[in-house]
Image (tube, helix red, strand yellow):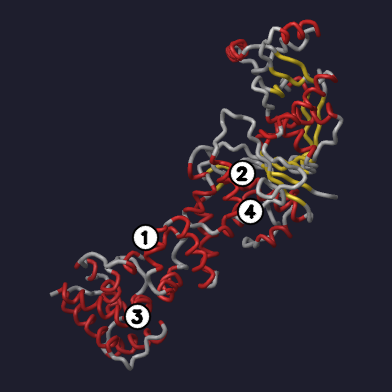
Amino acid sequence: MTVVTRFAPSPTWYLHIWSLRTVLYNYLFAKKNNWKFMLRIEDTDRSRYVEWSIENLLEVLASVWLIPDEWPNNPWKNWPYLQSERLDIYKKYVDELLKNGTAYYCFCSSKRLEKLREEQKNLWLPTKYDQNCRYLSEDEVKEKLDKGLPYTIRLRVPKNKDVTFEDMIKWKVTVNTKDIDDQVLFKSDWFPTYHLANVIDDHMMEITHVIRWDEWTPSTPKHVLLYESFGWEKPIFAHIPLLLWSDRKKLSKRTWDVSVESYLEKGYLVEAIINYISLLWWNPKSTREMFTIEELISEFKLEDVHKAWAVFDVDRLDWFNSKYLASLDIDLIYNKFITYLKRYDKNFHKTIKDLPEDYNKKILNELKTRIKKFSDFKRLTDFFYEEPWVLEIDLILNEKMKIKNLTTVKQWLNIALWILKDKNNDLKSIESIKNLFIEKIKEEWMKNGQVLWPVRVALSKKEFSPGALELIYIFWREKSIEKIENVLKELK
């Protein structure tokens, strides 16, 4: 079977995390079946239109490697891909519905409809159109049109009919038309509603599978009725459950933390985001958790998507990201890090590019198992790129390690200097540095921590940092000597 899927967002804000899930599942399903994934922009609701959101959407999709086969940047036979550029098409088909009697003119004012909704709410009734204009005669309609009265066009929903459709996740869904409103299809501004435009576009673009949020399940019977009104074969539907925060509350569409861009800005790897999002609803029926995009395409099945909502847990995303960071080759992770800084932190990018690449790679290699995302790097490495403030004496002393006075501190810092200044000592690896220090510590009958603690603090002036040996390896001989000598001056 030829499979064509689509993602059809409204340009109203940034691309959300749960919209990324929809993109991903449409992409995986299309590629699993060796066919096509399309992007269409549903921009007919002009009151909510945000101009920059289309550009952001296209940039983010490219950033996360989920590039459609057809979209505004890669047009093909289904052009145009913005619904606002397809208005003549919708007008043609709505005229067809008026002609065959499955749609009708509605002249009710917004004031009347608002009053109707209020009355229904006060009576605890469902808010539905009362079909006031459904039974107007042809002469009455013509008279109102001749007067130039504003109107909308509504779907004439059949009475007491069961509407059934197959759902790949929910199985079979049946709704009686008594629970379906006479939906507006064409608005008074001559723009179609979502319901009309998406049915026409899906048919014309030969969409075989509509994979979208569960929120659209109640609207699907209306779409089925439209397919039947046109005499078109309807696509196969798959409605994916909602996404909740860890507190079980629905994700808000208008907070920065739900946007894909915010997670890219924080320095999460695309691989980790895609891997984590894929597993929120989909069960690969194994204990395996780490998948490449190619492996996801091979393994993905819509039938294995959960029917219940899923919880978006940032801690879980952190875990995935840290696993990917720890597993990457240093050259690859460094290139990703530089790309990240170029886009999101140009000042820090300039700072580290002024230093030798080998120096930066040593730092990143040491910290890649300690950071959860790239944005953590700057906070944990400030002492590598700028001289720290004056040493806190209470920090270099350590009661737990029995480092109780500065005389002992000075003694061990001087011994460290002796090791570092001896040009015969090999400092080419952490292992060689470790052997030099451990041998000297054994000679003095001391414990490792009693020596390495003051050396580490002298080099970083931080309570938390990489170990003393790792710092020496990164700073190298001359810089380590300079830092320790400066601390000894401060201790005088």
Which disc is residue 279 wearing? Answer: 4
Q: Which residue is mark 3?
A: 476
Considering the numbered disc 1 on the image, is that residue within a helix, a strand or a loop? helix
Estimate how packed mark 2 is, as few (under 14), some (14 to 19) or many (20 or more) residues with alpha carbons within 10 Å: some
Q: Nearer the viewer, residue 71 or 161?
A: 71
C-alpha span from label 2 to label 1: 31 Å
Sequence-wise, which precedes: disc 4 or disc 2? 2
Q: Nearer the viewer, residue 449 or 70?
A: 70
Sequence-wise, which precedes: disc 2 or disc 3? 2
C-alpha span from label 4 to label 1: 30 Å
Q: Is residue 373 visible?
A: no
Q: Check if mark 3's residue and mark 1's residue have beta carbons within 8 Å.
A: no
Considering the numbered disc 2 on the image, is that residue within a helix, a strand or a loop? helix
Q: Nearer the viewer, residue 62 or 443?
A: 62
| Residue at 78% from the left image edge and 41% from the top image edge | 205
- Mark 4 or mark 1: which is in front? 1
Q: Which residue is mark 2?
A: 19
Q: Amino acid at mark 4?
A: Leu
Q: Amino acid at mark 1?
A: Arg
Estimate how packed mark 4 is, as few (under 14), some (14 to 19) or many (20 or more) residues with alpha carbons within 10 Å: some
Q: Check if mark 2's residue and mark 1's residue have beta carbons within 8 Å.
A: no
- Mark 4 or mark 3: which is in front? 3
Residue 201 horizontal side relative to residue 12, left or right: right
| Residue at 67% from the left image edge and 22% from the top image edge | 187
Sequence-wise, which precedes: disc 2 or disc 1? 2
Q: Which residue is mark 1?
A: 379
